[in-house]
Image: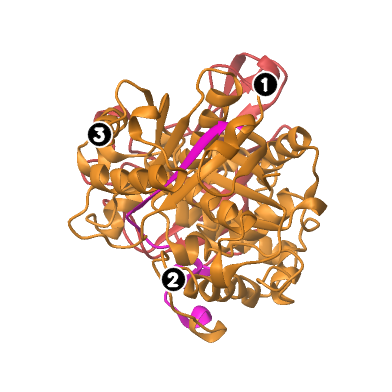
Chain colours: A red, B orange
């Protein structure tokens, strides 16, 4: 258990979503949350971006990963701690206080959070 | 609903337009479209402007009102249409609705964007502002979505990396014959394959450039189309659809649901299927997108579009020419203009005005993609009677 959670939403129909939405698939409403940081995930695909936007270190290794929580799949996207991965690798979420410089890009810094989880090969 | 005709089409040169800003670019294409249709600005009843981000790029908003005065179109109803990179296609949908519904008898659509005064990083960030906060904070950009998807596609379908380079080579070849294209230079497969990595496995020549430019179309009811100058085309079908804002939520990242859904609805409205399309303008912001749209629109089976690229079946002399204009890849991608310019190319093809790019065609299709398939508008056009 960490001090920070990677919170996915569970809807009434049992499906999960990361991030969550006020209304889920088929009109289901959120009924609970799951902390994905307690689980490992599988790399669905990945890339290394060399041309990064303001406030993002280059190269930026990124992946779409899939968690399985009690048999229910849920996907997330995020930075990788390394570009040395392949599709199908197992990764775990690792907390980072700041993923991107909030002051450098076009988005209003106060409009969103800037911490989160990178994915590290297990 | 009334049937809708396109009786005028124009576009500015695309590229780096030093000294031109969003207002002058829109006015340039708008005035040329008025001239092409043989009408005065004062005759317009509705005027739509497709534009994603003039406020963010230039600090200029209210561009639709400004354009109306610049073209002498007062007191026409004006509206700006923002559907990110699909703003042009969404503008076609809005213009079609205005005429089909009877709300307007003469509607002009002008799409445009001014981008090149910004650095590549800044422009990429403006475009990436459409992403979800959970994506944005990780530095996810549209090019990185393309890299993620291309890697999965190549592995899933055992496609050679060269097949993506073939898309770039084809579209650059087509752009040579388009006087308005940003790049009028042929490239070879080796050049594409050896260019710098941008989002692995994609390289520089897999990406469209940053572009200034504008394009315009004039719409009226079919029954009065003959009263305007020149040959006309008709909007046989047009439909839009939306996919997940959060791209990773899609079950299969190599399937663009909004392409499939908007295409199916446009086909149904037109009474045509993929086998009826003679020429297509697809949103090749990245080479991989041409494969995903060819498959989503039913031109090729899932996972097989790469074979068509390798065999030249989407070339100008192939069974289905794709992006005869040079596509976004070679012609350029001024965000709000791109969907309009796609229809300008199809209009020119269907009216026999495409010059050295001309292919034999009666039915054409445009697919304009916003975000990474977040929103899509598909339009089917056919030659007028």
Q: Nearer the viewer, mark 3 or mark 2?
A: 2
Q: Residue furthest front?
A: B227
Please report the residue visible at 53 percent of the width from the left and 24 percent of the height from the top.
Answer: B98
Badge 1 element: loop
Q: Are marks 3 and 1 in contact (CB under 8 Å)?
A: no
> Could you say which is closer to the camera, residue B354 or residue A62?
B354
Q: Nearer the viewer, mark 1 or mark 2?
A: 1
The answer to whether residue B204 is magenta is yes
Percent of width and height locating residue A25: 67, 23
Q: Which residue is mark 3?
A: A109
Please report the residue visible at 47 percent of the width from the left and 30 percent of the height from the top.
Answer: B107
Q: Which residue is mark 2?
A: B204
Badge 2 element: helix
The answer to whether residue B340 is magenta is no
Task: Looking at the image, tell me whether mark 1 or mark 2 is earlier in sequence order.
Answer: 1
Look at the image and tell me in which quarter the C terminus of chain B lies: top right
Which disc number belongs to residue B1? 1
Q: Is residue B219 above or below residue B15?
A: above
Q: Chain of mark 2?
A: B
Q: Which portion, as a residue range, is magenta? A: B192-221
Query: Can residue A79 be seen by looking at this rendering?
Result: no
> Could you say which is closer to the camera, residue A98 or residue A103?
A103
Q: Residues within 10 Å of mark 1 (few under 14, many from 20)?
A: few
Percent of width and height locating residue A82: 46, 62
Q: Residue furthest left?
A: B19
| A59 sits to left or right of B384 | left
């Amino acid at each position: 258990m960490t001090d920070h959670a990677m919170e996915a939403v569970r809807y009434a129909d049992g499906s999960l979503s990361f991030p969550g939405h006020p209304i889920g698939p088929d009109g289901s409403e959120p009924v609970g949350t799951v902390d994905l940081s307690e689980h490992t995930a599988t790399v669905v695909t990945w890339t290394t971006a060399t041309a990064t936007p303001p406030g993002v270190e280059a190269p930026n290794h990124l992946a779409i990963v899939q968690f399985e929580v009690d048999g229910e799949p849920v996907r997330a996207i995020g930075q990788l701690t390394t570009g040395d991965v392949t599709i199908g690798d197992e990764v775990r979420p690792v907390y980072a206080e700041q993923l991107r410089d909030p002051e450098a890009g076009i988005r209003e810094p106060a409009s969103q959070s800037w911490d989160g989880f990178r994915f590290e090969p297990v | 609903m009334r049937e809708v005709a396109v009786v005028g089409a124009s576009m500015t040169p695309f590229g780096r337009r030093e000294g031109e800003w969003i207002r002058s670019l829109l006015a340039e294409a708008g005035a040329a479209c008025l001239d092409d249709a043989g009408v005065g600005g004062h005759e317009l009843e509705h005027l739509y402007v497709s534009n994603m981000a003039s406020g963010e790029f230039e600090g200029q908003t209210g561009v639709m009102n400004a354009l109306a005065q610049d073209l002498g179109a007062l007191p026409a109803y004006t509206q700006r249409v923002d559907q990110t990179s699909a703003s042009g296609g969404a503008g076609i949908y809005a213009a079609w609705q205005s005429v089909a519904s009877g709300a307007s008898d003469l509607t002009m659509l002008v799409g445009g964007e001014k981008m090149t005064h910004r650095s590549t990083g800044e422009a990429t960030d403006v475009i990436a502002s459409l992403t979800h906060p959970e994506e944005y904070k990780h530095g996810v950009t549209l090019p990185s979505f393309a890299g993620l998807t291309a890697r999965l596609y190549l592995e899933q379908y055992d496609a050679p990396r060269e097949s993506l380079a073939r898309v770039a080579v084809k579209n650059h070849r087509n752009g040579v014959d388009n006087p308005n294209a940003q790049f009028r230079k042929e490239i070879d497969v080796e050049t594409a394959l050896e260019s710098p990595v941008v989002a692995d496995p994609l390289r520089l020549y897999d990406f469209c450039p940053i572009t200034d430019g504008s394009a315009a179309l004039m719409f009226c009811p079919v029954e009065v189309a003959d009263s305007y100058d020149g040959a006309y085309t008709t909007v046989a079908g047009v439909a839009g659809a939306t996919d997940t804002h959060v791209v990773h939520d899609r079950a299969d990242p190599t399937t663009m649901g909004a392409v499939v859904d908007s295409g199916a609805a446009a086909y149904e409205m037109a009474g045509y299927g993929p086998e009826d399309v003679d020429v297509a303008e697809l949103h090749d912001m990245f080479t991989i997108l041409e494969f995903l749209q060819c498959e989503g629109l039913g031109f090729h089976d899932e996972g097989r579009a790469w074979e068509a690229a390798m065999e030249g079946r989407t070339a100008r002399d192939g069974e289905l020419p794709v992006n005869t204009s040079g596509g976004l890849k070679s012609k350029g991608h001024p965000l709000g203009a791109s969907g309009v310019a796609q229809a300008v190319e199809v209009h020119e093809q269907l009216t026999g005005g495409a010059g050295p790019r001309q292919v034999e065609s009666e039915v054409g299709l445009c697919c304009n993609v916003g975000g990474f398939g977040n929103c899509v508008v598909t339009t089917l056009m056919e030659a007028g009677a």
